[in-house]
């Protein structure tokens, strides 16, 4: 791994944001598993914001439950959504939480599986780059 990464998230019943700093792929995976278990209890995905240490925002990921996710990448004020080639958009928005608020990610921003989202983030952790195996489309929202 090329450095430390801060994961920030807040489930609906949490009083404040939770921060976890990871410095290994195993630590990253363990933290995502904990957040995914919490999302299962909440019944909705939880938005997790990622920041390199020292702070540099990279973008949010939606973590569990369900088969789909969303990965947004920010570059010079523009957001890009990751998509697996050949994976069609969902019929409906993907409901997720950011703190006490329930929000919806549009179908065009959820064309990625949970596993592919995690793999894309591992590529970023190891190289600092976006995963070339995915398509990156300009996103309308963040």
Image: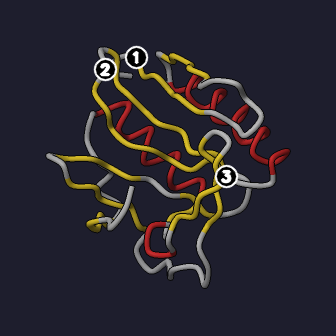
- Residue extending farthest to the left is 76
User: Quick check: 47 left or right of 39?
Assistant: left
Quarter of the view holding residue 126: top left
Q: Which mark is residue 45?
A: 3
Q: Along the polypeptide, which appears first: circle 1 or circle 3?
A: 1
Q: Secondary structure at mark 2?
A: loop
Q: Position of residue 96 (x, y in %)?
A: 64, 55
Q: Quadrant of the N terminus?
A: top left
Q: Which residue is mark 2?
A: 55
Q: Residue at x 63, y 35 (%)?
A: 32
User: Quick check: 48 left or right of 123?
Assistant: right
Q: Nearer the viewer, residue 122 or 95?
A: 95
* Disc 3/disc 2 C-alpha distance (Å): 24 Å
Q: Residue at x 47, y 36 (%)?
A: 49
Q: Along the polypeptide, which appears first: circle 2 or circle 1?
A: 1
Q: Residue at x 32, y 33 (%)?
A: 57
Q: Which residue is mark 1?
A: 4
Q: Nearer the viewer, residue 97 or 124?
A: 97
* Disc 1/disc 3 C-alpha distance (Å): 24 Å
Q: How is the image coloured?
A: secondary structure
Q: Along the polypeptide, which appears first: circle 3 or circle 2?
A: 3
Q: Secondary structure at mark 1?
A: strand
User: Quick check: 92 left or right of 8?
Assistant: right
């Amino acid at each position: 791994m090329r450095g430390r990464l801060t994961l920030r998230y807040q489930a609906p019943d949490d009083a404040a944001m939770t921060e976890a700093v990871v410095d290994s792929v195993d630590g990253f995976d363990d933290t995502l598993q904990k957040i995914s278990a919490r999302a299962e209890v909440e019944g909705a995905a939880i938005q997790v914001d990622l920041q390199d240490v020292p702070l540099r925002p990279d973008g949010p990921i939606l973590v569990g439950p369900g088969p789909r996710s969303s990965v947004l990448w920010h570059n010079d004020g523009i957001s890009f959504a990751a998509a697996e080639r050949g994976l069609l958009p969902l019929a409906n928005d993907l409901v997720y939480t950011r703190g006490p608020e329930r929000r919806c990610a549009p179908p065009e921003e959820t064309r990625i599986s949970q596993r592919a989202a995690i793999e894309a983030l591992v590529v970023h952790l190891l190289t600092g780059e976006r995963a070339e195996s995915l398509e990156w489309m300009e996103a309308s929202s963040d």
